[in-house]
Image (cartoon, grey):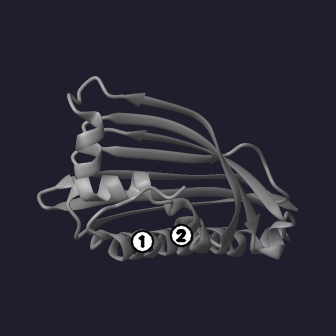
Amino acid sequence: MEHLSSGVSKQTFTVDCEFDRFRQIMVRKNATAAIVGHSGMTLLSEKVQDIELDTSRDDRPLLNAIRGKSKSEVTATKIIRVRLDDPTLEASELVLRQVANIHTSEIDVTTQATGPAGRLEDYSTTLNAQPDSQRTQVTISVEMSVRVQVPMLFVSRADVRVQQAADDAIKGQAAAIKQFIIENADQRLILPEL
């Protein structure tokens, strides 16, 4: 019997990093490889498809950017290709479309599969970050649907396995974000990676 198993997982946590600094790190450093690597995937490529920069709220955009106090807002779209490290999915690659909206008081990133890959019918993640006093509150989520071929008796076991995969992906992403911020937070000047 063919069955579509779904898993949904969500986690909210606080990072001991002031939001402006968190925002600067997330924009200037490439967090994609670190986060993807903790989700059971390997980053193959990423390509910026579109970028919009609004500096209208920033009277000194360049100086404020250097100081880490930018008031500019960015909307960017990337196409990301990843290698799937799970042979049971019967696909080696997945193409994702990521849309990031970066505002002065919020980061909102949605990453969605552009189509099915093998048995993986759908995959999406979200990241939302907001200031929380001198720290940053981050909420992440993962949703996935996997088409499985199992006898009717084992449908619930398949559902549990897909849910566990979603839970593991969320735990990995949370750990990756925390580690990524820790590795970069103490740098005096956060320079962009080119």
Name the spot of residue 123 as percent of width and height, x first: 65, 53
- Give 7 or 24, whichever is nearer the viewer: 24
> Could you tell whether 94 is left or right of 2 in the image?
left
Report the disc number at residue 180: 1
- In three-dimensional space, the C-alpha distance between marks 2 and 1, rounded to whole angstroms, equals 7 Å
Name the spot of residue 105 as percent of width and height, x first: 24, 42
Query: Residues at badges 2 and 1 in contact (C-beta under 8 Å)?
Result: yes
**Secondary-structure class at tag 1:** helix
Instruction: Please tell me in which quadrant of the rendered image residue 175 appears.
Output: bottom left
Name the spot of residue 28 as percent of width and height, x first: 42, 54
Q: Residue at x 33, y 54 (%)?
A: 24
Is 133 above or below relative to 49? below
Q: Residue at x 34, y 61 (%)?
A: 190
Instruction: Please tell me in which quadrant of the rendered image residue 7 appears.
Output: bottom right
Residue 10 visible here: yes
Q: Which residue is mark 2?
A: 34
* Other residues around mark 2 within 10 Å, as few (<14) / some (14–19) / many (≥20): some
* Other residues around mark 1 within 10 Å, as few (<14) / some (14–19) / many (≥20): some
